[in-house]
Amino acid sequence: MKSILIYINGKNYYCSPEMTINELIKYLNFDVNLIVVEYNKEIISKHLWALTTLTEGDKLEILTLVGGG
């Protein structure tokens, strides 16, 4: 199966064309409770992660939330 090129935090990444944002997040071992995902310059709600299939050239920024004071 051919892989597609996407960009995660400005870096090239190859993945399966059927992969969803949710699958990608799990594959990369992010804690879903501590991140926000920007998908093609828009914040995407967590309930849409499993419904959004990645396509060639997609750009994601995965931001980790950090508490502190």
Image (cartoon, rainbow, N blue to C red):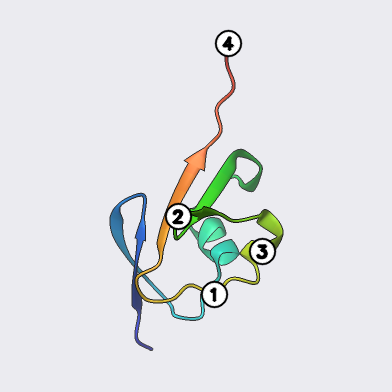
Extreme-front residue of the structure: 42
Q: On the image, numbered disc 2 is attached to which residue?
A: 41
Q: Earlier in the sequence, mark 1 or mark 3?
A: 3
Question: At 59% from the left edge and 71% from the top edge, which residue is drawn?
Answer: 52
CB under 8 Å between discs 4 and 2: no
Q: Earlier in the sequence, mark 1 or mark 4?
A: 1
Question: Gap in Å between the C-alphas at discs 3 and 2?
Answer: 15 Å
User: In the rendered image, is residue 52 in sight?
Assistant: yes
Question: At 62% from the left edge and 63% from the top edge, which residue is drawn?
Answer: 49
Q: Earlier in the sequence, mark 4 or mark 2?
A: 2
Q: On the image, numbered disc 4 is attached to which residue?
A: 69
For label 3, the SS is: helix
Residue 51 in the image, given as x and y percentages of width and height: 65, 72
Residue 65 in the image, given as x and y percentages of width and height: 56, 33
Residue 42 in the image, given as x and y percentages of width and height: 52, 55
Q: On the image, numbered disc 1 is attached to which residue?
A: 53
